[in-house]
Amino acid sequence: MKKTSLSARAPCPCDSGQPYADCCGPWHTGLILGVHAPTPEALMRSRYSAYVLGLIDYLLATWHASTSPGELDLAPVKWLGLEVRHAQSTGDAGVVEFVARCRTSAGAERLHETSRFVRTEGRWYYIDGKMNDAI
């Protein structure tokens, strides 16, 4: 999938209502500078935006080594929106429940997932996700 860029003032793809430069943009560019998402929800939103923008390197860098696929080939998907339903962290563990809407060659889909995150050396990583029942 081709990498896409956004202008700094464009709405963030994660549907936070903030400009990209004030939301997921700093985490995407900050990875190079050692700046990381401060919460599981911020990481999940930045990962959703990375899927929208085709930022494979960011997705792999934020995936915990114990569950990382090592490489990604993003299927052609048009991401249509994100709704965060619940986010919580306790100590170095976190969960985020969300619904992501997309369109694939098979038609419109809604992915309802509860994702797990872990903080290692001050940095949050995605571990895995459990698909919830159909909406």
Image (spheres, rainbow, N blue to C red):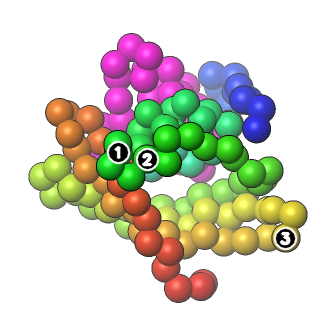
Observer-nearest residue: 88 or 134? Answer: 134
Which residue is the site of mark 2? 68
Spatial CA distance of label 1 from label 2 is 6 Å
Which residue is the site of mark 3? 107
Do residues under tags 1 and 2 come within 8 Å of each other at their CB atoms?
yes
Asked whether 112 falls inside the magenta stretch, the response is: no
Which residue is the site of mark 1? 64
49 up-or-down from 87: above or below: above
User: Which comes sooner in the sequence, label 1 or label 3?
Assistant: 1
The quarter of the picture where residue 94 lies is bottom left
Q: Which mark is residue 82?
A: none
User: Which comes sooner in the sequence, label 2 or label 3?
Assistant: 2
The residue type indicated by label 2 comes to Ser
Write the residue at 73% across / 71% down: 109
The residue type indicated by label 3 comes to Gly
Give how far across and how far down residue 104 sits, in percent: 81, 62
The magenta segment: 12-39
